[in-house]
Image: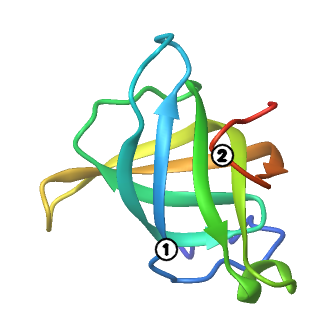
């Protein structure tokens, strides 16, 4: 049986450098990664960390013009992990994050979310 596509916005297979920070452990360090695919509503990336579905995260990235139709800007996104799955090719886990809201970062690295 063919899997039904449930996404409402286009997803792009773009490799965008990003960092993320789990919010369940206060003061946890940012971790570097790279997007596997991205949309205006979420991102998928690979990591060595064991992250849980439902966990809140901040994702810091330069949102590309192809995705939002505006010049690329640095975003701080508050989101939640919606899926994790093993990446057999690289021995990591692919993590899908749904963006709940975001701030455009004007200066520094802070997030208001």
In the image, residue 45 above or below residue 100:
below
For label 2, count other residues whose C-alpha is less than 10 Å away and answer few (under 14), some (14-19) or many (20+).
few
Give percent across and percent down for residue 76.
70, 47
Q: Give the labeled residue for mark 1.
A: 16
Residue drawn 76% across the image and 52% down it? 105
SS class, disc 2 = loop
In which quadrant of the rendered view does residue 106 lie?
bottom right
Whether the residues at callouts 2 and 1 have beta carbons within 8 Å, the answer is no
Tell me the CA gap for discs 2 and 1.
19 Å
Say whether residue 68 is left or right of residue 83. Answer: right
Vertical placement of 25 versus 36: above or below? above
* Above-or-below relation of 80 to 19: above
Instruction: Count up the numbered dots.
Output: 2
Q: Give the mark nearest the N terminus, 2 or 1.
A: 1
x 14%, y 63%: residue: 90
Left or right for 78, reference 69: left
User: Which quadrant is the C terminus positioned in?
Assistant: top right
Residue at x-position 58% and y-position 46%: 59
Spot occupied by residue 99 in the image (x, y as percentages of width and height): 73, 47
**Quadrant hosting residue 104:** bottom right
Neighbor class of circle 1 (other Cα within 10 Å; few <14, some 14-19, many 20+) is: some
Q: How far across and how far down the image is residue 87, in percent?
A: 24, 58
Local secondary structure at mark 1: loop
Q: Work out whether residue 38 or residue 105 is closer to the camera in this orientation and state it.
A: 105
Q: Residue furthest front?
A: 107
Q: Which mark is residue 108?
A: 2
Residue 70 rendering spot, x and y as whole percentages: 87, 83
Q: Judge by depth and name the residue closer to the eye, 27 or 35.
A: 27
Residue at the image point whose x is 61% and y is 70% from the top: 38
Q: Nearer the viewer, mark 2 or mark 1?
A: 2
């Amino acid at each position: 049986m063919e899997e039904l596509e449930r996404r409402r916005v286009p997803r792009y297979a773009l490799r965008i450098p990003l960092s993320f920070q789990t919010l369940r452990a206060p003061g946890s360090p940012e971790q570097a990664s790279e997007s596997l695919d991205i949309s205006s509503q979420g991102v998928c990336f690979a990591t060595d960390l064991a992250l849980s579905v439902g966990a809140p995260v901040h994702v810091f990235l330069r949102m590309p013009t192809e995705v939002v139709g505006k010049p690329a800007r640095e975003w701080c996104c508050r989101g939640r992990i919606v899926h994790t799955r093993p990446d057999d090719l690289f021995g990591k886990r692919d993590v899908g994050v749904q963006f709940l809201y975001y701030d455009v970062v004007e200066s520094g690295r802070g997030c208001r979310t």
